Amino acid sequence: MTERAKKRGSRYNPKKPRGRRASHWFGTLLLIGLVGFAFVLTSYLGYLDYNVRKQFEGKRWAIPARVYANPVELYAGYNLTEAKFEELLGQLHYRTDPLLSADGTFFKKDQGIIVKTRDFTFLDQKQPSTTLRVDFNQSGISAVTDLTQKKDIAIIRMDPVLIGSFYPTIKEDRVLIKLEEAPDMLIKGLLASEDRDFYQHFGISLRGIARAMWNNMRAGGMVQGGSTITQQLVKNFYLTSERSLSRKVKEALMALILEYRYSKNEILEAYLNEIYLGQDGASAVHGFGLASEFYFGGSLKNLPMEQLATLVALVRGPSEYDPRRFPERSLQRRNLVLDEMAAEGYLSTEQAEEAKAKPLNVIANTHRSANRYPGFLDLVKRQLRRDYREEDLTSEGLVIFTTLDTRIQDTLEQTVASKLSQLEKLPKTKNLETAVVVTHRDSGEIAALASGRKNSASGFNRALDAVRPIGSLIKPVVYLSALEYPNRYTITSPVSDSAVFVKGPNGNDWSPKNYDNREHGTVPLHTALAKSYNLATVRIGMDVGIARTAKTLRNMGVTRKVELYPSFLLGAMQLTPMEVTQMYQTLAGDGFSPPLKAIRGVLSSSGERLQSYPFTVRQAVDPSATYIVNTILQEVMQSGTGQSAYSAFPPGYGLVGKTGTTNDAKDSWFAGYSGDYLSVVWVGRDDNKPAGLTGATGALQVWTALMRQISTQPVDLIPPDNIKMVWVDPYNGLLAGETCPGARNYPYISGSEPTAYSSCSPTPGTQQDSNWFNDLFTQ
């Protein structure tokens, strides 16, 4: 080796110089690692901080819309029995309490029920809680007394029945409360049981963890947790239920961030509304506001000490301490909470012992959040979508007031179940389905709706979506169109019920028949409708014009496009039960058509009125012609195809209605009204096979069974000013005196009535010319 090489080699002596270099590199790498770790940690904390603030400062919860039935109004004379009132109180989750210690309680006394109502914000006003005595007699309510003011009151509303909710994808429900609305003892119970150092720690309590470990060791089991209220909120609000060290670290870091960013009161209020406290079917119960209603049927502010302690006990494990499934375990845990409150000085020993002596007193689990009437709620949601987005309906906590009458709805469902089972005992009838719509005759508000035989959310709503031929239900529209031309047609105009042949394109000729396969010759117009004669109807419709009849149908509120074929005049067109109801609502409204509605109004979660759906009405068709059609439809019920209804109603009830049967008896229809309700019934099969029922033997039977239970008012048709009542001689259709043998009183639009007088003693020639009239009045 040369001297130069030696010198150069000496520069790389592996001993001391190399040690310094390795140490230098190690220090550098360590510094880089520390800087990198600090950067990653800072970035991660920034990420956690962003997520904490984003959710906590934004919209914290998706609150489902709550849907309420029409409230029951109590007043003297209302036909509500004591048993039915008790049933209503059960639906409202009122509980028996002779002391009336809280809102939503009642007890029976003598011939009455004493009830302490809940305060409730209605669409028009807020109604405070009050104590009532409701007395009953054999016919219903005899008196309503306000015991607070010691005076009888004319009318008062009960809080409405919650019939369902519109949920977001994750089915969580809660009733939001503010911290100042939470009972003081609830807060103290939480502090004593869950986090004694809440107002001292910064999100994590080392002292609390140590105390929990010591108490658990002494008890030989898990009796106390170490998580703070802040940590529990983080776990419920931000994280999954995963059990891992990384998740616990993340929980601790987020708790520290939450405490740094927000005040103790803000954290506590969020906790009160977020904590998971049970399961109601598929819906999770979050927060103490909803839990109070779910377990005790009342507002949180009204709960006694022992019930507040029961709710606090659920925090440790809603399933393990469920007071309905495990009452003994729940009672033990509740009493431990009370002892902890006493130990902290929040309760005296005497107060704790008095509360521990009380039973749990939870209400029966009636699945308060379940959608009890899915067919009707489907209609409500469809109508709301005209004004609200889907996310508004499922996340903004809207309060929706509907027109549903739960008593009528329950009666409808029971009637459908019993009558269809009965009908299926007839020959050739099986697998029957149905759809029913019930409205208030005067307003068009929907009181009840059956979307099928069973009350289930099947996805197919027959009342709204089943498009079926309507058969003879179209005939009143044909006759209404004709009667709007009083110079051509009156109630007694002679019409021909004889064979009709209509030549169609491509050889599609049409030759309809009557149901009885007979021709009836010349008959008065009202008999043609009352007896539902096809041939006479087609002749009238062809004379007036198919397009003119279709226009009348549109005026009556049916917007569906129809094909203008002659068979349209006999109901070959297809409509849904809802569309048929709109059509007959116009008849029931004496020619004025209110749009069918299921919603009265909408409030925001804070009680602000967002939307109201006031009563609106328009004149759709001539009221005078409508009056004459309704008069004939009364004849349908008295002596025509609907006369079997009078087996359940007194003779003078004035029912108005029309049967409908389609080819091969595939569809059985009935539409009719009393003085207070209009009901439309369809009965048939989903597979479109023959049901083996006519309108009279099928749908009318369901209609009659329902209406005899819900209707209390007969029909009283009031003639318009330009209607003239005229006595007519049955032999010749001429004017007659009231005392003329067999004379009948008929309505005419002024100027269209007969002008010639009858002698009331027809000659043989007149008799012969008037056989069609004589036939009418001898049927």
Image (cartoon, rainbow, N blue to C red):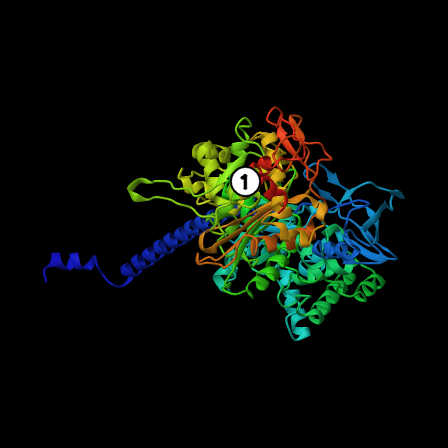
Relative to 513, 647 lies left or right: right
- Residue 273 shows up from this direction: no
Relative to 42, 491 lies left or right: right
**Residue lying furthest left:** 2
List x then y, in percent, for residue 723: 65, 28
Q: Which residue is mark 1?
A: 523
Quadrant of residue 423 within the rendered picture: bottom right
Is the residue 731 above or below the residue 405 in the image? above
Label 1: element kind: strand
Relative to 754, 475 lies left or right: left
List x then y, in percent, for residue 396: 57, 43
Disc 1 residue type? Val
Q: Residue at x 47, y 44 (%)?
A: 571
- Front residue of 241/657: it is 657
Quadrant of residue 609 within the rendered picture: top right
- Front residue of 766/422: it is 766
List x then y, in percent, for residue 137: 84, 53
| Quadrant in which the N terminus is drawn | bottom left
List x then y, in percent, for residue 173: 59, 52
Q: Residue at x 75, y 41 (%)?
A: 127
Quadrant of residue 283 within the rendered picture: bottom right
